[in-house]
């Protein structure tokens, strides 16, 4: 499909190197008007997909970060109580109905991400980040919103969507999501990129990273991921490390094994992992990098 | 399918589309057989996709269907195999429907457990003797809550391995299920009593006092929601434990049903995640399914390796700061005891408490001398016997303090 290739191209232009399947997923999202659920380890670039998608469509990115205890007033809408109170004081002595009409108008409504997402003139990208952190109740509520795209506010009436946002949900798997939500969404599992793709990501993101250095870094990271680690480094860590190496002025990993070992702190974030990857291990891994 | 008709007549188009939709329906059925949840909506969307031209290249169609039909990582991973087998006629390695739980079919460790029932130790009598007829859970609410424990008082102090006739075993099982239920009610009640706020919620206070013209008469407070206790049970299903696994399986079944947050694993030479199989409502059927999994492949208990698997693949998802890990094992480690010590230390860092239940502890003359239990002891918060229902009951106050 032409559409799909275009998407892959435009994603690449926006700095996100996607695999073929992700481009399919995004074209399906538009075709079937379904949300996309992204799962994968921390740091494989799930959130980046949404950012890249917003760039591709040239629209706004509206982000809702989920956390335990997230409720409607933080996610959907809330009345601006302070202003309402002021208004009541200011209009003191007027008809009660008139005041009521005034203070329950849209002027006093505070938009939260979910409401904002359905009231834009141009469909925005709505990123619901780490949905697994929110409570079950919120998930159920979200499910309803995602199927109807309308919100009812008791004092104001039902607000229907002006445009349907492109919805992306991400999950780290700290809690099992409900089957209903899973069924509603398209599913894409984001895996660690292969060497070739990771090298291209480094080249796209880090200024001054040459092709050979990027490939070396990607291979080295792949080798490190195969070690028994507590926290496997993600793409974000790879980019940090690449930036560090480029900043120091490394041209070839083999020239400066000392620097390579010392900068591994960008990749290994626990004491245990750090002490497991000793100088000898670093050298052995470097040896495997062609 | 919408190419303007230079040659095929309407009938032919009809014929083709009928064939395609029949094939698609068959594919959906295959997916359902492989435990995918595929609804009508997905079927329609799939047909729409084929009509738009995704069917031109198999690779493209596979990728599109994969996104549409899979809903979790396990399904995502096995989809390509199923697709290729169905549409391209390729043979797939070991991707078939296995009896029982959907997830069992694609969990490699479970698979190997299920494939080896013939090698099982012959002494697994306790789990096999459950008469599936009369062990339906006692669904009596309210006033009957303590009843299970008290009516079963005659068996609460008998060592599980001395339970002989099926009636007694059934009774013990019912009591174990009841115990799980009671534990749950007590532990939550305690949570409710503590729900008092300490911080002022300014927004809500103003909101609720608008009717007083903004004078804050009624104050709204807030408090962080307490996370409920999460219980993670790791049950040793090796041959040496076979006399106890039956009752514990029943207890775990009750716990998973009653606790909002509980997970269960079985281990002998490998670790198997069994929460899903346990969520079967019917206790008899759940136990049948589990006793198949519980039959070890023979060859001892590798507690250390099993814990390593747990720490690496499950701990991050399953444990949080208010988790209690309950290990039920006799501690006869046939693998590396040092590894067990290391993994216990790692586990201890991740959860609130580790409870180790050892049924053999109450045996006369028992001393924790096996290398495994010796290595594990320093990391255990509570080391208790659990050979009778009474000793299980005694655990509850301890859990309530977490």
Image (cartoon, grey):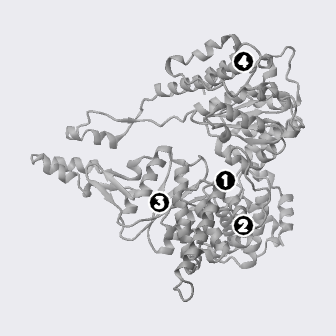
Tag 1–tag 3 contact (CB < 8 Å): no
Q: Earlier in the sequence, mark 1 or mark 4?
A: 1
Q: Which residue is mark 2?
A: B84
Is the residue at mark 3 from the same chain as the one at mark 4? Answer: no
Q: Which residue is mark 4?
A: B167
Tell me the residue at 55%/54% (across/down). Answer: A182
Give the structural element (helix, strand or loop) at label 1.
helix
Q: Is residue B85 visible?
A: yes
Is the residue at mark 1 from the same chain as the one at mark 2? Answer: yes
Give the structural element (helix, strand or loop) at label 4.
helix
Q: Which residue is mark 3?
A: A63
- Which chain letter goes with mark 2? B
Q: Report how far apart the C-alphas of labels 1 and 2 lie in the structure.
A: 16 Å
Q: Is residue B295 left or right of residue A172?
A: right
Is the residue at mark 2 from the same chain as the one at mark 4? Answer: yes
Front-lying residue, A220 or B257: B257
Front: mark 1 or 3: 1
Place residue A108 in its image quadrant. bottom left
Q: Report how far apart the C-alphas of labels 1 and 4 lie in the structure.
A: 37 Å
Q: Report how far apart the C-alphas of labels 3 and 2 lie in the structure.
A: 38 Å
Residue lying at the far front in this picture: please name it.
B11
Q: Is residue B42 left or right of residue A212?
A: left
Q: Which residue is mark 1?
A: B33
Q: Earlier in the sequence, mark 2 or mark 4?
A: 2
- Which chain letter goes with mark 4? B
Q: Looking at the image, is B197 positioned above or below residue B276?
A: above
Q: Report how far apart the C-alphas of labels 2 and 4 lie in the structure.
A: 51 Å
Give the structural element (helix, strand or loop) at label 2.
helix
Tag 2–tag 4 contact (CB < 8 Å): no
């Amino acid at each position: 499909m032409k559409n799909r290739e275009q998407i892959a191209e435009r994603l690449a232009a926006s700095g996100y190197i996607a695999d073929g399947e992700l481009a399919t997923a995004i074209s399906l999202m538009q075709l079937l008007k379904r949300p996309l659920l992204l799962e994968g380890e921390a740091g494989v670039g799930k959130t980046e997909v949404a950012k890249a998608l917003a760039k591709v469509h040239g629209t706004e990115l509206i982000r809702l970060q989920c956390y335990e205890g997230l409720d409607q007033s933080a996610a959907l809408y809330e009345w601006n109580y302070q202003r309402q109170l002021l208004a009541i004081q200011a209009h003191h002595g007027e008809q009660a109905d008139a005041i009521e009409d005034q203070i329950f108008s849209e002027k006093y409504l505070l938009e939260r991400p979910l409401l904002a997402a359905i009231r834009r003139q141009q469909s925005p990208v709505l990123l619901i980040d780490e949905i697994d952190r929110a409570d079950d109740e919120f998930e159920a509520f979200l499910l309803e919103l995602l199927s109807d795209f309308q919100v009812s506010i008791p004092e104001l009436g039902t607000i229907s969507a002006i445009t349907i946002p492109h919805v992306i949900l991400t999950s780290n798997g700290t809690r099992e999501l409900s089957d209903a939500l899973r069924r509603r969404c398209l599913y894409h599992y984001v895996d660690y990129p292969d060497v070739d793709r990771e090298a291209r990501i480094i080249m796209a993101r880090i200024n001054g990273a040459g092709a050979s250095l990027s490939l070396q870094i990607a291979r080295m990271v792949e080798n490190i991921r195969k070690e028994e680690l507590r926290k496997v480094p993600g793409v974000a860590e790879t980019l940090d490390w690449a930036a560090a190496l480029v900043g120091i002025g490394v041209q070839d990993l083999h020239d400066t094994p000392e620097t390579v070992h010392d900068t591994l702190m960008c990749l290994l974030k626990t004491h245990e992992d750090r002490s497991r990857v000793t100088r000898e291990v670093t050298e052995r891994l470097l040896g495997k990098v062609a | 399918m919408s190419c303007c008709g230079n040659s095929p007549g309407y009938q032919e188009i009809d014929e083709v589309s009928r064939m395609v939709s029949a094939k698609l329906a068959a594919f959906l059925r295959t997916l359902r057989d492989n435990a995918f949840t595929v609804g009508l909506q997905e079927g329609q969307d799939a047909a729409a996709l084929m009509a738009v031209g995704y069917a031109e290249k198999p690779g493209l169609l596979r990728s599109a269907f994969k996104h549409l039909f899979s809903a979790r990582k396990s399904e995502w991973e096995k989809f390509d195999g199923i697709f290729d087998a169905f549409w391209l006629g390729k043979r797939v390695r070991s991707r078939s429907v296995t009896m029982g739980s959907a997830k069992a079919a694609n969990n490699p460790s479970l698979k190997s457990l299920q494939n080896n029932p013939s090698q099982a130790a012959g002494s697994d009598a306790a789990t096999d003797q459950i008469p599936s007829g009369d062990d339906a859970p006692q669904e009596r609410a309210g006033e009957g809550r303590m009843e299970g424990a008290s009516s079963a008082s005659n068996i609460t102090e008998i060592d599980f391995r001395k339970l002989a006739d099926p009636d007694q075993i059934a009774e013990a099982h019912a009591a174990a299920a009841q115990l799980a239920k009671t534990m749950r009610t007590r532990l939550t009640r305690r949570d409710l009593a503590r729900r008092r706020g300490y911080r002022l919620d300014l927004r809500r206070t103003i909101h609720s006092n608008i009717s007083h013209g903004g004078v804050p008469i009624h104050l709204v407070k807030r408090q962080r929601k307490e996370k409920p206790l999460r219980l993670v049970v790791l049950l040793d299903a090796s041959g040496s434990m076979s006399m106890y696994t039956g009752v514990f399986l029943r207890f775990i079944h009750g716990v998973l049903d009653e606790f909002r947050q509980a997970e269960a694993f079985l281990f002998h030479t490998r670790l198997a995640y069994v929460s899903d199989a346990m969520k079967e409502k019917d206790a008899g059927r759940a136990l049948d399914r589990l006793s198949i999994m519980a039959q070890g492949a023979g060859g001892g208990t590798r507690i250390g390796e099993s814990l390593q698997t747990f720490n690496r693949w499950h701990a991050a998802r399953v444990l949080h700061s208010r988790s209690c890990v309950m290990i039920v094992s006799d501690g006869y480690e046939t693998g590396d005891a040092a590894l067990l010590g290391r993994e216990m230390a790692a586990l201890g860092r991740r959860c609130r408490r580790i409870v180790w239940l050892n049924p053999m502890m109450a045996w006369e003359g028992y001393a924790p001398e096996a290398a495994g239990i010796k290595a594990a002891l320093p990391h255990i918060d509570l080391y208790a016997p659990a050979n009778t229902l009474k000793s299980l009951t005694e655990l509850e106050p301890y859990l309530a303090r977490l």
